[in-house]
Image: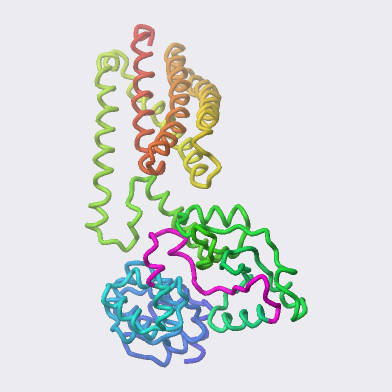
Amino acid sequence: MEENTETLQESDLEAHEIIDTINTWIESSNDEKLLEYLQDLHPADVAETMTALDKEDNAIYLFRLCEPLKQGQIIVELNEDILAELIESLNLKEISLLSTDMESDDLTYLLSEIPQEKAEHILNSIDSEESSKIRSQLQYEENTAGRLMSTEFVVVRENESVRKGIYNLRKISKRDHKVYIMYVVNTQDVVTGYVSLKDLFFAKDKTKIHEIMNSEIKTVQYDMDQEEVARFFQKYDYISAAVVDENGVMLGRITVDDVLDIVEEEASEDILRMAGLSEDEKFYTPIFETVKSRIPWLHINLITAVLASSVVTFFESTIDRAVVLASLMPIVAGMGGNAGTQAITIVVRNIAIGELSERQWKQAISRELIIGLLNGVILGCVTAAFVFIFKQKLVLSLVIGSAMLINLIVAGLVGSGIPLLLKYLGIDPAIASSIFVTTFTDIFGFFCFLGLASLFVEYL
């Protein structure tokens, strides 16, 4: 048994073999092997294992074998779908036990995800002061610093001694292991600076805090959007930041591990939106819900495809006279779509990370226009050369080269302009930018190519 468990923990078996083995142990109620496997497993790894199990009942069974302290650490690592199923299966006593030693930010997240009845039961079962803090935190808007912050932090007043600071540090550290700095406040609880733990420990006990504090500190407003919080940490290279109210009074703190989750969430959200998908869609989302969320954008795609097709229909007589055009026109449209997508990606990314503001719209558009022009000249010449080599028709090669040039310029214009326009209108620029750009490049690509071909159809 020990040899088998050790083999699993060292990952000598393939991942699917490990999951199959765990499923077998659960089906046979072999708790002894399961407990030995879980003993030294990190909570995040337990959550990952639960997600991989083929049955929800098996995941819940594995979860219940863990001690309450570890359960509290596991539950905040689970994806929303499994979390919902798990919470529904747990009774009030089990939820209360696992929430006992949870940090305030994790507990706030858990309470926001569970039914109101169970949330109230937990709030009524914990310390009244802690309960009051959590209730206040739940009043903040979702995805803001107020919701993300932890209300456990080390603080000391400017006029207090190093001895008092160390006492406060020891008191908080008993229940919070993520202590990086000590915040300093004045008599009105306004944040005025911080003290590094190194400076605190090397200072003499009777030294006043204001003598060793660093007053150069940036704080986060409680209503700051989580995306702005991530930018804040990136800009100032903080590992912990104080969250304050309008008057600068300290309410809580956010640590860098919370920010990493934000970065992943925001990046995933933008990727999904650019593809016309719902930000709530997950791999485990039911199929019919997925179809329901995707079908509206596919309808929009259908409409745009019909618009592009109508341009082709307008030039049917030209295509009848020069059938070769039918095989070449997708090249122009396709290259325009690819170039537009490149422009969108750069612009949306720079908007997302705060490096491109609305005031810089002229710079962004002119830059992409120049890139489109240069790409158009290069690719237009290359395309014209290939067409001339294979078709031996000079006018045809000049037509497709010119159409390629024009369409890549258009791609640069709309690829940079549409995200900036959506941003100006207060709409997330990641939403469906690619759909609109693809429509423009398809329509302009077909129109330019077939329009030029119509002018010189006698020479094709």
242 over 15 or under it: above or below: above
Closer-to-camera residue (418/59):
418
Q: How many marks?
A: 0
Q: Position of residue 259 (x, y in %)?
A: 52, 61
Q: Position of residue 75 (x, y in %)?
A: 40, 75
Q: Position of residue 312 (x, y in %)?
A: 28, 22
**Residue 222 seen from this side:** yes
142 over 34 or under it: above or below: above
Q: Quadrant of residue 248?
A: bottom right
Identify which residue is drawn at 38% across, 13% down.
452
Identify which residue is drawn at 58% across, 54% down.
234
34 over 182 or under it: above or below: below
Q: Position of residue 153 (x, y in %)?
A: 55, 73
2 over 16 or under it: above or below: below
Closer-to-camera residue (281/157):
157
Does the magenta segment cover residue 146?
yes
Closer-to-camera residue (80/400):
80
Residue 295 placement, left or right of 205: left
Identify which residue is drawn at 48% across, 21% down.
405
Q: Quadrant of the C terminus?
A: top left
Give the farthest residue toward the top. Answer: 458
Which residues make up the magenta segment? Answer: 135-163
Closer-to-camera residue (330/158):
158
Q: Quadrant of residue 144?
A: bottom left
Does the magenta segment cover residue 149?
yes
